[in-house]
Amino acid sequence: MASEAFARWAARTEASLERLLPAADETATAPARLHAAMRHAALGGGKRMRPLLVYAAGTALGADEASLDAPAAAVELVHAYSLVHDDLPAMDDDDLRRGRPTVHVAFDEATAILAGDALQTLAFSALAAADAPAPLRIEWVRTLAEASGVAGMCGGQALDIDATGGKGGQSPFPHSGKTDSGPLSPVVFLERMHALKTGALIRASVRMGALGGGAGAPALAHLDRFASALGLAFQIRDDLLDVEASSEQLGKTAGKDAAQAKATYPALLGMDGARTRLAEQAAAMHAALAPFGGRADALAALGELAVRRTH
């Protein structure tokens, strides 16, 4: 069953992170405070969606679970770093993450910045040292780097900052960009922003797993369509939960999007419109996985979890 596989893969991820992260107990060397902050960020629970996607995609194509440990841990380290920086006062300024104080609250802002930096570099160190052929390791590094940088997560975050907090009747999309046919509509801009901010790392997770399983171009194309729909579904559901759920359910501060005048799917489409868009992504995921049959059951289950999650 998928749930058994998810529990096993989550445990593998925890073990890999525990092994990779520097110690923060009485055996720790300096800088022990930085080490403790890294562990606070990376070992603080969470859904582990991205490592699960690595394992689900890789095993669907015949990869051994152990061969996927490095990319699964690496993508989670990058995700953890992104959350540390996203919570900073200069960004979303949040005090709560996964039901615990955010890193800059539990430690201090400077330590949080350094912890995020260190988690990011540790991810690429893990990939470089992975027990895998050099061409595969290079492709893993390239995939994760592209998904993390200006053409991925960082670029999406910059667009999110531009689109937050329109004042004085100003549009919340001051720099939404243009195409040859004119300015982007707010909804198209929002989807492009989240394809970078949220979707890029999700697509990289699926791709890294698939590469570990030796996927060819046709399989990668189908899986990329699945991952693109999953990334959008994950963000739409996140926006809906920010309206519907409590801080206790979410493990982070609810209602932050509205308080910061963020551009969200409910804000642009209404709650019913956002739910319709979410259903469209669920159908797109199902269609993209159809060629894989039962081999993709775990991926399909993760897609279903993203659509129906309550936190």
Image: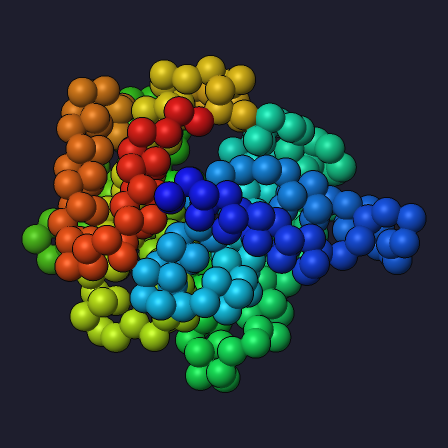
Pick the quarter of the image with the N terminus: top left
Q: How many marks?
A: 0
Image quadrant holding the C terminus, namely top left
Residue drawn where x is 33% and y is 48% of the image: 298
Give the quarter of the image for residue 125: bottom right
Tell me which residue sits at (58%, 62%) in the image.
123
Image height of 93 relative to 195, above or below: above
Q: Quadrant of residue 168?
A: top left
As displayed, is residue 125 above or below residue 276?
A: below
Answer with left or right where residue 86 lies relative to residue 302.
right
In the displayed structure, 161 sits above or below 139; it is above
Please say whether residue 205 is visible from this viewpoint.
no
Residue 29: percent from left, percent from top? 88, 57
Measured from the top left, where is residue 100 in percent x and y?
A: 64, 28
Question: Can you name the residue that lies furthest to the bottom here?
Answer: 134
Q: Left of 30 or right of it: where is 259? A: left
Q: Residue at x 60, y 67 (%)?
A: 126
In the image: residue 272, left or right of residue 2: left
* Residue 302, picture quadrant: top left
* Location of residue 11 in the rendering, given as x and y in whole percent from the top left corner: 58, 48
Front-lying residue, 296 or 209:
296
- Whether residue 53 is visible: yes
Q: How is the image coloured?
A: rainbow
Which residue extends farthest front? 1
| Residue drawn at the location 37% of the way across and 29% of the way down | 309
Residue nearest the viewer, comparing 46 with 199: 46
Residue farthest to the left, as pictured: 181
